[in-house]
Image (spheres, rainbow, N blue to C red):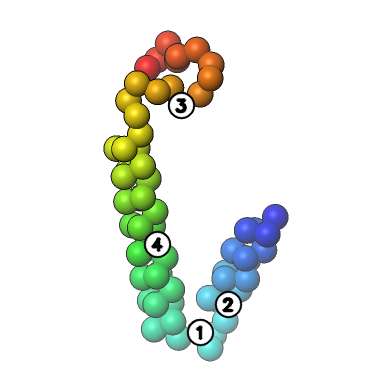
């Protein structure tokens, strides 16, 4: 719910005629950088995860 509100606020702010192209570029670059940081964190976490330890307590998936 809160995320939907935040997304709507960003959307509305970007649609305003007084929003400059430079502001939009700054926002998009910051979001892209956060995506890269998150992707790197997840990649590192998965690389360091113990290979012999199951992630869940249930049976192993038949699909691997």
| Circle 2/circle 4 CB separation < 8 Å | no
Q: Circle 4: is it few (<14), some (14-19), or many (20+) Cα within 10 Å? A: few
Residue behind mark 2: 13
Q: Gap in Å between the C-alphas at discs 2 and 4?
A: 20 Å
Q: Earlier in the sequence, mark 2 or mark 1?
A: 2
Question: What label does residue 55 carry, if any?
Answer: 3
Q: Gap in Å between the C-alphas at discs 1 and 4?
A: 22 Å
Question: What label does residue 19 carry, if any?
Answer: 1
Between circles 3 and 4, the one closer to the viewer is: 3
Q: Nearer the viewer, residue 37 or 45?
A: 45
| Circle 2/circle 1 CB separation < 8 Å | yes
| Circle 1/circle 3 CB separation < 8 Å | no
Could you say where residue 21 lies in the image, as x and y percent from the top left? 41, 82
Q: Earlier in the sequence, mark 2 or mark 4?
A: 2
Q: Gap in Å between the C-alphas at discs 2 and 1?
A: 7 Å
Hey, which quadrant is residue 29 in on the image?
bottom left
Could you say where residue 41 lies in the image, as x and y percent from the top left? 36, 50
């Amino acid at each position: 719910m809160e995320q939907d509100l935040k997304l709507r606020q960003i959307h509305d702010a970007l649609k305003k005629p007084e929003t400059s192209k430079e502001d939009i570029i700054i926002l998009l670059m910051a979001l892209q950088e956060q995506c890269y940081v998150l992707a790197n964190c997840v990649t590192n976490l998965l690389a360091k995860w113990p290979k012999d330890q199951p992630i869940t307590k249930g049976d192993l998936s038949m699909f691997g």
